[in-house]
Image (cartoon, rainbow, N blue to C red):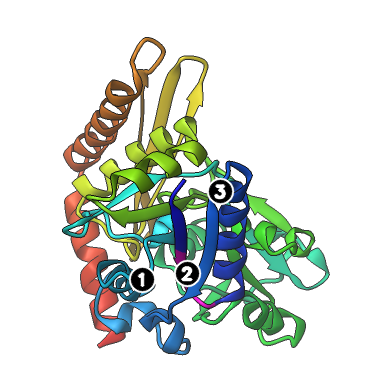
Amino acid sequence: MPAIVLGTRGSLLARTQTGHVADQLRAVGCDVTIEVVQTTGDVKRDAPIASLGREGVFVHELERALKEGRVNAAVHSCKDLPTSDTEGLTVVAIPQRVTPFDMLVTAGSVPLADLPAGAVIGTSSIRRATQLKKLRPDLETAPLRGNIDTRLQRVTSGDYAGIILAAAGLERVGLADRGAELLEPPRFWPAIAQGALAIQIRADDEPLREALALIDDAHSHRAIQAERACLAALAGGCLAPIGGYAREKGNKLELTACVLENTPTGVERIDVTRSVSVEAADAEHAMQAAAELGQQVADELRQAGADAMLERMRKLQGERSG
């Protein structure tokens, strides 16, 4: 087995989830060490993500460390990865996905329906804010950045009535009990690839590719393949108001994706659900079928008007951050 140096962001969540990956690799006989790499998104914690000017603000420095040989594998939150591969690098493993949905955290664990009108909810995600507006147009949203502890403190201190976080992050750091309500489809759709980790290596590192295949979860990988193919076809990044979730039901892989838009009369949403059989396919063909499923769902969303909706939302975001 090759010796593996895992690169990770420095946040508690990133180090914790990389530790889980390291434990899985050690269990199959790998020698693993962890190297912390600071990223732009970590250094500029108070700036809105959209203001940092590009996708991958939690990714680029890790990829540079890979290319320079300081690490030979990088662990990413899959939803942070741009949908196009970086030249010379490739994602080779998706460990088993954990809860992919969002979690509402409030003081006293008050559920969404019981929050008072005008209550302020912290989130910097346009996807989350737009869906929240559809469910509770009488609530307000405000920006939220920082690590998990910093965000939770905004509720404890009374700055915000509640915040919305990825349930997976709370689970991984042992704080799932802080959640007031799990926000699940069909009323609240998660970010593409939320709850999944991606392990990226140099594309020519075949021995490491084979070692990492031992912790790849085929079901999770196919679901993520479908979701990310859909996002790529929509030309949507992690900041776009696009949600989606794929899962296997029996011998079929089912994907639902949606596009959201704030309008003067309320929130509009279009969504498409399609499925494909993965029962008889070998691993390679099953992954190809998953990618084609994502493309099909994106095509149907575009036919229903997704391009125009996304363009109007990008323009609105630009006006607010300008």
State if disc 2 and disc 1 touch (CB < 8 Å): yes
Q: Is residue 158 above or below residue 22?
A: below
Magenta stretch, overall SS: strand
On screen, residue 149 versus residue 145, left or right, reads right
Q: Position of residue 290 (x, y in %)?
A: 32, 30
Q: Earlier in the sequence, mark 3 or mark 1?
A: 3
**What residue would you read off at disc 3?**
25
Q: How many marks?
A: 3
Task: Examine the structure image and report whether residue 9 is included in the region drawn in magenta.
Answer: yes
Task: Examine the structure image and report whether residue 101 is included in the region drawn in magenta.
Answer: no
Q: Secondary structure at mark 3?
A: helix
Q: Position of residue 159 (x, y in %)?
A: 67, 87
Q: Is residue 287 above or below residue 63?
A: above
Q: Position of residue 213 (x, y in %)?
A: 43, 38
**What residue would you read off at disc 1?**
62
**What residue would you read off at disc 2?**
8
User: Given the image, on which type of amino acid does mark 2 rest?
Assistant: Thr
